[in-house]
């Protein structure tokens, strides 16, 4: 094998001083150096590289925190503040983009930017349009009205004669955890 590699190198007019054993001892996959070149592509269709991704993330996370604090102090907003603050702390503590991606562990920084934009938009929508943590008195009254009608019909246990006529065993309808006969509507 060494002979073939040397012959190939000499046939291309390349001086080769390394033997095959020096190549075989190297790892196949090398980690990227700490000071890697800037990205040229994300590898994701339709997602361009953001050259100032760190600054964009800091801005988005700060804006999300300010916006969440401006709304009511409910669990959803508290969760968004904690999530954004954690990610902001990671971004501010690290200069290297790959380290940020590794610590947050939710994709590339370009994906993190999209997530932060979506989270900010959802925060606004949830607080201004839906407000699911509030009780709508009209809807609650309507639900109580039809709930009582729907569930007020007693469930009857089928008569054993009906099963015997069809050749079914009543004992097979017993549930294993209660021993009660199954009820049908």
Image: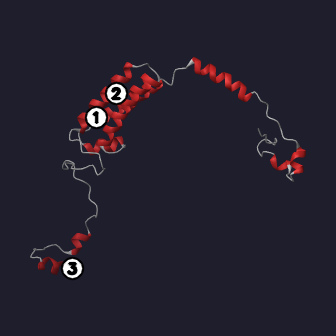
Disc 1 crowd rating (10 Å Cα; few below 14, some 14-19, many 20+) is many
Q: Which of marks 3 and 2 is in front?
A: 2
> Helix or strand or loop: what does disc 3 sit on?
helix
Front residue (pair 142, 87): 142
Q: Determine the CA span between mark 2 and mark 1.
A: 10 Å
**Residue 77: image x %, image y %?**
43, 25
* Precedes in sequence: disc 1 or disc 3: 3
Where is the C terminus found, in terms of image quarters? top right
Where is residue 178, by image quadrant?
top right
Front residue (pair 27, 146): 146
Residue plotted at (76% across, 43% down): 177
Front residue (pair 179, 50): 50
> Helix or strand or loop: what does disc 2 sit on?
helix
The residue where tag 3 is placed is 2
Q: In this view, does 76 lie to the left or right of 57?
A: right
**Residue 174: image x %, image y %?**
81, 45
Residue plotted at (58% across, 18% down): 138
Where is the N terminus found, in terms of image quarters? bottom left
Mark drawn on residue 64: 2
Residue plotted at (34% across, 45% down): 107
Disc 3 crowd rating (10 Å Cα; few below 14, some 14-19, many 20+) is few
The residue where tag 1 is placed is 57
Q: Is residue 21 left or right of residue 145?
A: left
The vertical placement of 19 against 42, above or below, is below
* Precedes in sequence: disc 3 or disc 2: 3
**Residue 155: image x %, image y %?**
79, 34
């Amino acid at each position: 094998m060494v002979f073939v590699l040397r012959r190939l190198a000499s046939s291309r007019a390349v001086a080769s001083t390394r033997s095959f054993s020096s190549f075989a001892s190297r790892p196949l996959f090398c980690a990227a150096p700490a000071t890697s070149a800037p990205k040229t592509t994300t590898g994701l269709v339709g997602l361009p590289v953001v050259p100032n991704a760190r600054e964009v993330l800091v801005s988005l996370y700060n804006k999300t925190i300010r916006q969440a604090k401006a709304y009511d102090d409910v669990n959803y907003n508290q969760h968004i503040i904690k999530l954004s603050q954690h990610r902001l702390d990671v971004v501010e503590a690290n200069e290297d983009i790959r380290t940020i991606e590794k610590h947050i562990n939710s994709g590339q920084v370009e994906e993190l930017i999209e997530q932060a934009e979506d989270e900010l938009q959802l925060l606004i929508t949830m607080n201004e349009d839906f407000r699911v943590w509030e009780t709508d008195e009209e809807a609650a009254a309507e639900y109580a009205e039809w709930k009582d009608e729907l569930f007020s019909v007693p469930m009857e246990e089928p008569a054993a004669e009906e099963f015997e006529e069809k050749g079914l065993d009543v004992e097979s309808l017993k549930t294993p955890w209660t021993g009660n006969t199954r009820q049908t509507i």
